[in-house]
Amino acid sequence: MKTRIVILGCMALFSACVTTQSITFLQPTYFPQPTYQFSENSVSESKVYLGRVLFYDPILSGDSSISCASCHSSYNAFSHTDHKLSHGIRGE
């Protein structure tokens, strides 16, 4: 619980320190149309940074042992190339 409070405190501090500028999403023509409502929750540099930090932080796993990046390798385009399902916590 203390760790989550610290993370929330860091998020608040980061949000206060970074000026949020709108980031333009350039969609390739071959991509499907997004269903996400960007007008209701715009993309910003601070949100992208927060997502990146959380993606590599193991605190979000059930036992704080692995991060999303542990299985979703950027080297493999964030996919699994050597097995059908991720190994998960304790190989389950």
Image: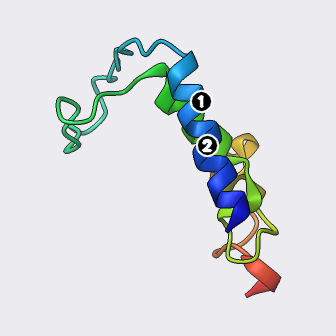
List x then y, in percent, for residue 49.
58, 29
Label 1 sits on a secondary structure element that is helix
Give residue 40's quadrant in the image. top left
Disc 1 crowd rating (10 Å Cα; few below 14, some 14-19, many 20+) is: few
Check disc 2 and report the residue beneath it.
Answer: 9
Q: Residue at x 57, y 38 (%)?
A: 11
Q: Name the amino acid, label 1.
A: Leu
Q: Which residue is drawn at 52% across and 22% down?
A: 16
Q: Nearer the viewer, residue 23 or 32?
A: 23
Q: In which quarter of the image is the C terminus?
A: bottom right
Check disc 1 and report the residue beneath it.
Answer: 13
Tell me if I can see residue 12 in this picture. Answer: yes
List x then y, in percent, for residue 17.
57, 17
Q: Residue at x 59, y 27 (%)?
A: 14
Disc 2 crowd rating (10 Å Cα; few below 14, some 14-19, many 20+) is: few
List x then y, in percent, for residue 24.
34, 14
The colour scheme used here is: rainbow
The answer to whether residue 83 is above or below residue 31 is: below
Circles 2 and 1 in contact, beta carbons < 8 Å: yes
Q: Name the amino acid, label 2.
A: Gly
Label 2 sits on a secondary structure element that is helix
